[in-house]
Amino acid sequence: QVQLVESGGGLVQAGGSLRLSCAASGRTFSTYNMGWFRQAPGEEREFVAVISRYGGRLVYADSVKGRFTISRDNAKNTVYMQMNSLKPEDTAVYYCAAKPGDYGLGDAPRYDYWGQGTQVTVSS
């Protein structure tokens, strides 16, 4: 069982930056691939980024490539996402999620554990 708690969301102007954090409970954090997803009102949850267990593989959605950076610190049981050059279309609730297997890293239904989400609002 893994419990995930996101933080770091807020209101920011277009072009600004935010850093999201996701703290995980338990001693098996390094056995999970960690993903970030987001969901805007009226939209389906969409993949944003994923980082493999020890950080060797990073995958980003095209919409955030070059602006967002995912990272993790296994000693602190925490995954981060640095978000730069934010746009109004980045406005959403952002969720972190944990997945032990390597198949379907971009598929939300394949993730086993989810945080409660943190709101990111980008004003124009």
Image (spheres, grey):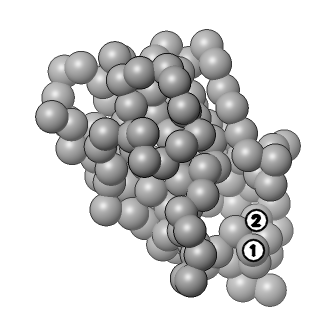
Count of all numbered marks drawn on residues in the image? 2
Q: In which quarter of the image is the N terminus?
A: top left
Up-down: is 20 above or below 72? below
Residue at figure coordinates x 66%, y 26% from the top left: 58
Residue type at mark 2: give it.
Answer: Leu
Residue 112 visible in the current orientation = yes
Residue at figure coordinates x 64%, y 19% from the top left: 57
User: Which residue carries the number 1 mark?
Assistant: 89
User: Which residue carries the number 2 mark?
Assistant: 86
Up-down: is 88 above or below 75? below
Residue type at mark 1: give it.
Answer: Glu
Q: Nearer the viewer, residue 22 or 53?
A: 53
Residue at figure coordinates x 39%, y 63% from the top left: 117
Q: Which of 6 and 39 is in front in this view?
A: 39
Say left or right for 54 vs 82.
left
Residue 73 visible in the current orientation = no
Whole-percent x, y for residue 122 in the image: 68, 77
Q: Which of 102 and 38 is in front in this view?
A: 102
Whole-percent x, y for residue 104 in the image: 54, 32
> Which quadrant of the view contains residue 29?
top left
Say left or right for 90 vs 71.
right
> Which quadrant of the view contains residue 56?
top right
